């Protein structure tokens, strides 16, 4: 009965949505298991810990208020780097790691900014990856006037991370033309008051008229919005949380749905609070009766060097499809090239029972690595008892220390096991992390559950020999402590079934950020091939390979630091029959002070029902700077199919933000139930690939406050010099494994579902010379793939009508518009027939694509086009006339009034010309005197 209960628990865990162990959970209104990790390169400073505690404690109160007493931070785990001194109060981590932390504390790669931001690239309502705060942000109070109190910043970023909402400002489009024919600063709510002005000098000792863009009539980029320090409105946190009066998120009543910000673009003009109301947290909670939340509790954790045990299946099924040999090849690569120096490694084998092949051994040098490879199993017999292997690994760990939490098991199996539920409780309570590798089509379905409940990685490899999947899986199991300077990176993974007397040729680009401990590894299926490797300067390394003919592996280790540039390899199958040949290249960073280019690949879900597309992501970065213009290809393999998918960073389709270094795409070609593995290859071109400042969701940088007719100026926001972003990375290649997702619920023999074109999210509109110019990124016939059959474009002079009644809006004639292939930029212009374009005209546009079968996409974002003569109202007077301007907007100038003035007097024209450089004090409900 106890076993049946454990099996039932495991089945229940299998039904979860693939969430990792210790993922943040909401329990009785409180968030628990929040992990804040300090990067190992941050110099030791215990004041950082104190500031984290103070920030979180106060943020909990602010969150409690902002959420209307629904949420607070219950418990937080602070992960101390191993590079800091030990302390008796520090416990040992269990499944917590830097790579899986919710908040990371790390210096920016460049020295030019400390913007708090959230790495967020999913859709509206989808959780982000992590919040990044810098040590300076935590310890330097000079940032308080810029971002506001730290606790408020944390809540702003938490809303990004947890609820998938977006910012309500827009640095790229800070102004928009409002329906009352005046320019508004992009914000929510419009009740936030302040002035738009240009400083006379760097200290802003005075303000002067803003310059005007003669093409659009809007303020130029030199104009800034300075909010009043005292406000009457209470929202919104996602615009600028630093204002003292701001204690709420914008809701349906206060939301500014016409502002051209990311929240409106990504969330279909819904307010932040409306998105939060749809979250699982909101639906699972009720407001608390307490006036203040309980205090947050803190736990301090500090890890050490890795302690790993390989738990390897040697059952009789491992004799099929050369699994035994492939296991030994892949495990050898892990030992020789992947696991970090200083780690401890043990080896266990299991079939119906388990045995220890090697106790924990410290890896000190290449000789100790080589010695460990001699203990790899060479057996294939008996049944499968996964729990026996796990329990044996626990024994190996406990010989070193009775506390085994935080240790890692790499579990590989190819068979089913009806008794796997018998050890689920032991696994959960052990605190050990289990990384799983499912080999072949029959591996136990419970493997992913084992990795999920322990916070481990999960991989799968098919029996297709040319996919190199098993080696890729082992190559992906690096330390997760944030120290990239010690980690092996996979540069190349190639495999192909090569006919007799034919070649496998390839090029590997080794850039200047890597080159230490560089290995070229060749495997073969039958007969040893002839191998040639040439450096960029033509040095021939063909005679330097070390062969293991029994294992069918040949390995080349480049001495010192490998030469930067394009390396070429040529492998000749001298066998008369075809055989599979593979090439794997790994390398470590060339310098601890120069972060390497890294790739992090994953999907938006661990499971799917084949009725919803899977989003595939690949984050390409150097340190914390995005890498742009790379060629990124995803390879998705199941036991029945292997597919390629181009990933793009264009802000369209599956990609939320353009040029943020996150390359995205939809996977739609499901080929039945089972496991699907993800591998991503990245190619960077010399003088093509470049770095970028971090874009996307981050805390608002306040340029200063407007107080009593004067500006309290903050330092200008530092920008990253172009020469730093133009750093020539040279050619580079990277390969990474992205884990597994499992498809269920697809009837056998059923056809894959047909999806409509994806939504257009970047529609843009302009008016010039009485013509409308539209542009957008083309979607596909099916999501973001192929070519759509048609477009439907509609327009209205009223935003709300187009938003609520798209089907009733005026149709734009697109009969001459031939859709381009997905990913290309569409350009379309026309002259409206039913709308007279004149000064002050505003037209709103929305579009959607259709497929050949008339499946229509969702309606796009709404784009605004306007015809405006250049003007800007005057700088506000600190002691104004108590009743200037129009009755509905005191202190503002309405464009209709200006046009009437022009028709009444030539002098009016002169006045218009003279004030074209003036500053407007922007107010939706402006007051008759500045706030004091």
Image (cartoon, rainbow, N blue to C red):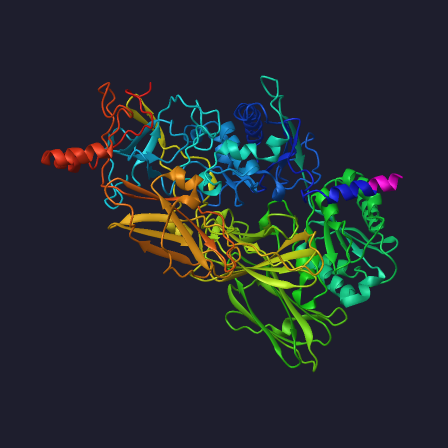
Check residue 767 for magenta coloring: no
- Residue 466 or 184: which is nearer the viewer? 184
Q: Is residue 319 above or below residue 389?
A: below
Q: Position of residue 525 (x, y in %)?
A: 72, 72
Q: Where residue 660 sits: x, y (%)? A: 47, 48
In-front residue for pair 874/500: 874
Point out residue 716 in the picture as x, y percentages from the top left corner.
35, 36
Residue 312 located left or right of residue 246: right
Magenta region: 1-6
Residue 786 seen in the current view: yes
Tell me which corner region of the image, top left, top right, bottom left or bottom right, holds residue 426: top right
Residue closer to the observer: 297 or 769: 769
Query: Can you name the residue that lies furthest to the left here?
Result: 906
Residue closest to the eye, 220 or 429 = 220
Above or below, 824 against 391 in this view is below
Q: Mostly what secondary structure, the magenta segment?
A: helix
Query: Which quadrant of the figure has residue 13?
Result: top right
Q: Looking at the figure, which quarter contains the C terminus?
A: top left
Residue 911 horizontal side relative to residue 617, left or right: left
| Above-or-below relation of 882 to 26 | above
**Image spot of residue 299 (x, y percent):** 66, 30
Figure quadrant of the N terminus: top right
Q: How many marks?
A: 0
């Amino acid at each position: 009965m106890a076993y049946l209960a454990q099996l039932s628990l495991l089945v229940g865990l299998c039904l979860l949505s693939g969430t990792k162990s210790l993922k943040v959970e909401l329990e009785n209104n409180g968030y628990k298991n929040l992990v804040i990790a300090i990067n190992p390169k941050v110099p030791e400073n215990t004041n950082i810990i104190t500031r984290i505690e103070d920030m979180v404690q106060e943020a909990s109160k602010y969150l409690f208020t902002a959420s209307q007493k629904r949420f607070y931070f219950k418990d937080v785990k602070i992960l101390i780097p191993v590079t800091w001194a030990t302390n008796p109060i520090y416990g040992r981590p269990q499944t917590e790691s830097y790579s899986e932390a919710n908040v990371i504390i790390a210096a920016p790669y460049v020295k030019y900014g400390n913007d708090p931001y959230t790495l967020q690239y999913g859709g509206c309502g989808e959780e982000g990856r992590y919040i990044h705060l810098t040590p300076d942000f935590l310890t330097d109070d000079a940032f308080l006037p810029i971002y506001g109190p730290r606790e408020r910043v944390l809540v702003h970023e938490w809303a990004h991370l947890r609820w998938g909402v977006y910012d309500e400002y827009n640095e790229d489009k800070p102004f928009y033309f409002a329906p009352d024919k005046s320019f508004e600063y992009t914000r929510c709510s419009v009740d936030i008051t302040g002035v738009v002005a240009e400083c006379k000098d760097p200290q802003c000792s005075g303000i002067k008229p803003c310059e005007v863009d003669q093409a659009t009539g809007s303020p130029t980029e030199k104009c800034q919005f300075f909010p009043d320090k005292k406000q009457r409105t209470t929202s919104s946190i996602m615009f600028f949380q630093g204002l003292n009066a701001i204690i709420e998120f914008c809701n349906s009543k206060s939301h500014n749905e016409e502002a051209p910000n990311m929240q409106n673009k990504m969330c279909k003009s819904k307010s932040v609070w409306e998105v939060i109301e749809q979250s699982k947290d909101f639906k699972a909670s009720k407001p608390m009766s307490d006036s203040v939340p309980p205090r947050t509790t803190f736990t301090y954790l500090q890890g050490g060097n890795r302690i790993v045990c390989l738990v390897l299946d040697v059952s009789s099924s491992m004799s099929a499809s050369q699994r035994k040999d492939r296991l030994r090849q892949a495990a050898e690569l892990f030992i020789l090239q992947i696991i970090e120096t200083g780690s401890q490694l043990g080896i266990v084998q299991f079939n119906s029972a388990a045995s220890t092949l090697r106790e924990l051994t410290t890896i000190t040098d290449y000789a100790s690595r080589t010695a460990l490879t001699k203990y790899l199993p060479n057996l294939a017999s008996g049944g499968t008892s996964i729990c026996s292997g796990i329990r044996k690994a626990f024994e190996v760990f406990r010989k070193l220390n009775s506390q085994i939490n935080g240790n890692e098991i790499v579990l590989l199996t190819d068979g089913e096991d009806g008794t796997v539920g018998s050890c689920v409780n032991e696994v959960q309570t052990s605190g050990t992390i289990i990384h799983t590798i499912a080999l072949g089509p029959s591996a136990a379905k419970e493997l992913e559950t084992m990795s999920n409940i322990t916070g481990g990685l999960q991989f799968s490899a098919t029996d297709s020999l040319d996919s190199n999947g098993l080696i890729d899986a082992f190559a992906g199991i690096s330390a997760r402590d944030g120290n990239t300077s010690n980690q092996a990176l996979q540069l190349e993974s190639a495999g192909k079934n090569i006919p007799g007397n034919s070649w496998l040729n390839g090029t590997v680009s080794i850039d200047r950020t890597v080159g230490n401990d560089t290995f070229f590894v060749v495997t073969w299926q039958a007969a040893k091939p002839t191998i040639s490797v040439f450096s960029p300067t033509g040095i021939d390394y063909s005679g330097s390979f070390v062969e293991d003919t029994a294992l069918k592996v040949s390995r080349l280790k480049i001495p010192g630091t490998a030469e930067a540039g394009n390396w070429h390899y040529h492998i000749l199958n001298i066998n008369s029959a075809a055989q599979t040949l593979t090439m794997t290249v790994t390398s470590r960073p060339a310098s601890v002070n120069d972060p390497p280019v890294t790739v992090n690949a994953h999907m938006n879900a661990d499971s799917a029902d084949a009725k919803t597309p899977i989003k595939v992501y690949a984050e390409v970065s150097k340190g914390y700077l995005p890498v742009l213009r790379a060629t990124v290809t995803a390879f998705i393999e199941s036991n029945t199919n292997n597919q390629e998918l181009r990933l793009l960073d264009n802000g369209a389709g599956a990609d939320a933000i353009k040029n943020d270094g996150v390359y995205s795409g939809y996977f739609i070609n499901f080929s039945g139930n089972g496991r699907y593995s993800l591998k991503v290859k990245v190619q960077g071109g010399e003088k093509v690939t470049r770095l970028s400042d971090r874009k996307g969701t981050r805390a608002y940088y306040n340029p200063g406050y407007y107080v009593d007719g004067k500006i309290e100026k903050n330092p200008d926001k530092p920008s990253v010099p172009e020469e730093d972003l133009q750093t020539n990375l040279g050619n580079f290649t990277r390969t990474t494994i992205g884990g597994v997702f499992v498809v269920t619920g697809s009837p056998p023999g059923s056809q894959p579902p047909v999806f409509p074109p994806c939504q257009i999210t970047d529609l843009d509109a302009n008016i010039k010379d009485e013509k409308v110019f539209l542009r957008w990124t083309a979607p596909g016939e099916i999501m973001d793939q192929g070519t759509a059959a048609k477009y439907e474009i509609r327009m209205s002079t009223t935003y709300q009508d187009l938003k609520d009644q798209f089907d009733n809006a005026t149709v734009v004639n697109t009969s001459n518009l031939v859709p381009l292939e997905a990913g290309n930029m569409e350009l379309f212009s026309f002259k409206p027939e039913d709308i007279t374009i004149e000064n002050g005209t505003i037209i709103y546009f929305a579009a959607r694509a259709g497929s050949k079968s008339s499946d229509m996409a969702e309606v796009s974002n709404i784009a605004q086009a306007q015809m405006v003569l250049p003007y800007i109202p005057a700088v506000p007077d600190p002691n104004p006339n108590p009743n200037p301007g129009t009755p509905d907007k005191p202190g503002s100038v309405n464009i209709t009034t200006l046009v009437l003035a022009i028709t009444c007097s030539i002098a009016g024209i002169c006045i218009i010309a003279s004030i074209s450089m003036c500053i407007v004090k922007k107010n939706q409900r402006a007051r008759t005197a500045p706030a004091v």
